[in-house]
Every structure is written in C-alpha cells, then in structure tokens.
Amino acid sequence: MNTFDDLLKAYERQVQLPWLDDAPPAGRVWLLWFDKSMQRKFTGRIGEFEHATMKTGRGWRQVSLAPWFGQWIAGNEFFEALLDHPQEIRGLLADAESALIHHLKSELAATNSNDVLALDGCGSLFGLARVSALISKVADSIPGRMLVSFPGKHAAGIYRLLDARDGWNYHAIPIPPDHAL
C-alpha cells in the first residue's frame, strides 16, 4: 500500500512533466488513487498537493464533491416532500448527475491551460453518480489538467471506486503509475 508521502512524490513527478497542449481529453485527467482508508488524510493534507503544483508555476483550483449532493438536494424544489418520502430520491439521480456535470464544467471554465482542477470527495458520490460517467462527460472541457482523488483500486487501467462495484477502464494518467503497486 502506498503512503501519503508516496502519493505526494508521485504527484510531484507528474506535475513537473511538460504538458502537451494537444493532449487528448483522457490524457488531461490524472487519477490519484489510494486506499480508501487514506481519504481523511488526503483531504486534510491536500494543501501539500496545491503547494507542489504552485512550485511548478501552475495554477490550482480545488472542488470538494463531499458536500455537493447535500447542497443540491437541499435546494431542490421537492426537498420538503423528499423528507417524508426519501425513497423518491432515486428518481432524481439523473437530474443530480446533470447538475453536477454542469457544476464541474463551470469550475473547469474558471481554469486555463496552465491550471490543475483538483476534485476531492469522489467517494461521497458512491451510489449517486458514477465517477467514470462524470469524467467522460467533462473531459472535453478540461483546458489544463484535472486531478481526481480516487479512493479505491487501480490495476492495468481498471479503476474501482471504494473497492466496490465492477471496475471501469479509463485511459487517464494513474498516479502512482501501475508499477508502483
């Protein structure tokens, strides 16, 4: 298992590499994967990733997905009715995913080709939206790079959020790379 310091060193190596302006969308996504037990440590020390990014002359913007669904559902016009019938939330998940995609595209629009948009709290989306679907729907909007903190497993291009559900194959840049298993 990788330690936090291993993750930070792997990220520092990645962020120091030259960025190709013509990188395909999948090449603009960096999936920083780690054991789910490290989520709190990562979130608490994410500033070290920001510092590593800024040292290279790159910009940094962070988005926490952890509170997103709670804020979205609390602002929903049906919120009061959902309190009495929470089973109905499932019917709003497609709307929630669309709203989250719009939110992420807005955040990406606030960055430029020299910036990293860091997404933290992906585990909070478990059961609500698939991280794979979100990434594929916003990848074309990434001007710089998007760092996705990913509590789960990665091997041979297959990612599994929280070590649950079937894995999905995505051609993002894994941090640390496969050989760091």
Image (cartoon, rainbow, N blue to C red):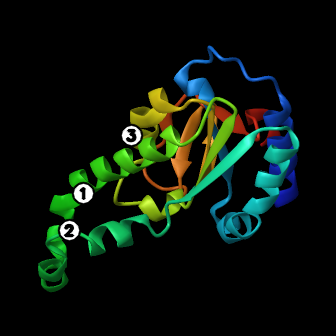
Q: Quadrant of residue 79?
A: bottom left
Asked if the residues shown at circle 1 and circle 2 are in contact, with their CB atoms under 8 angstroms apart, the answer is yes
The residue under the point 83% across, 53% down is 51
| Residue lying furthest bottom | 84
The residue under the point 53% across, 24% down is 25
Q: Categorize mark 1 by other alpha carbons within 10 Å: few (<14), some (14-19), many (20+).
A: some
Image quadrant holding the C terminus, namely: top right
The answer to which of marks 2 and 3 sits earlier in the sequence is 2
Identified by mark 3, the residue type is Ala
The residue under the point 46% across, 70% down is 67
Location of residue 97 with respect to 64 vertically, above or below: above
Identified by mark 1, the residue type is Leu
Where residue 152 appears, x then y in whole percent?
60, 53
Decide which of 106, 88 is in the foreground and name it. 106
Label 2, secondary structure: give it.
helix
Q: Which residue is mark 3?
A: 133
Where residue 174 appears, x then y in whole percent?
68, 36
Q: Which residue is mark 2?
A: 89
Q: Which residue is mark 1?
A: 93
The residue under the point 70% across, 17% down is 20
CA separation in Å, label 1 and label 2:
7 Å
